[in-house]
Image: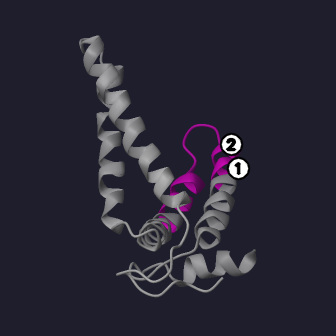
Amino acid sequence: MFTYLIRFFKKAFQFRGRATRREYWIPSLIMAAVGALVGAKGKGDNPLDGAFTAIVMIPSLSVTARRYQDAGITGWYQLPQMLSFLLLPIVFMKFTKKWMKITAITVMAAVNIIGLVFSLMPSEGDNRYGKKPAR
């Protein structure tokens, strides 16, 4: 388990290549748990929360790109996922029509559910992003 966590940080700036599901999910779940603890620890302005996000952001982008590439999808698919959250303010604006709110929520959900499916897809041998990674 710690092997995957160490690999998560060692390959922080490696956006090429592939990552197995374990290499993606184990650090992602650990970082989510640690992030929840850090966020719950401080009420209001918590400098640890910002520091944790800054430390984990690049490695998370890297491992996600490699995970998508393992599934045969370009790592650039993260961009629409991140940009979809720019629609979030539309949902909370009072003057926004109901159909616009529904559309924004639907787009955000669809783009991120597709990303989840990509991260769950199995490795299918060699692809254009490299050889199938060893476990």
Q: Which mark is residue 37?
A: 1
Which amino acid, by three-letter code, is at mark 2?
Ala
Query: Residue at coordinates 36% horizontally, 21% vertically from top-left?
Result: 92
Cα distance in 3D space between marks 1 and 2: 5 Å
* Local SS, label 2: helix
Give the magenta range.
35-55
Along the line of sight, the residue nearer the viewer: 31 or 130:
130
Image x and y of residue 25, in percent: 62, 63
At 24% from the left and 15% from the top, the residue drawn is 96
Q: Residue at x 51, y 74 (%)?
A: 124
Q: Quadrant of residue 5?
A: bottom right
Residue 28, image x, y percentages: 61, 61
Q: Residue furthest front?
A: 124
- x, y percentage for residue 69? 41, 72
Query: Is 50 within the magenta?
Result: yes
Residue behind mark 2: 40
Quarter of the image where one finds residue 101? top left
Is the C-beta separation of discs 1 and 2 under 8 Å? Answer: yes
| Mark number displayed over residue 81 | none
The C terminus, quarter of image: bottom right
Determine the secondary structure under disc 1: helix
Tell me if I can see residue 88 in this picture. no
The amino acid type found where label 1 is placed reads: Leu
> Looking at the picture, does residue 25 appear above or below residue 17?
above
- Tell me, yes or no, if residue 53 can be seen here: yes
Is 78 left, or right, of 44 in this rendering?
left
Q: Is residue 34 above or below residue 42?
A: below
Up-down: is 27 above or below 90? below
The residue under the point 27% across, 15% down is 99
Q: Badge 2: few (under 14), some or many (20 or more) residues near its Cα, within 10 Å? A: few
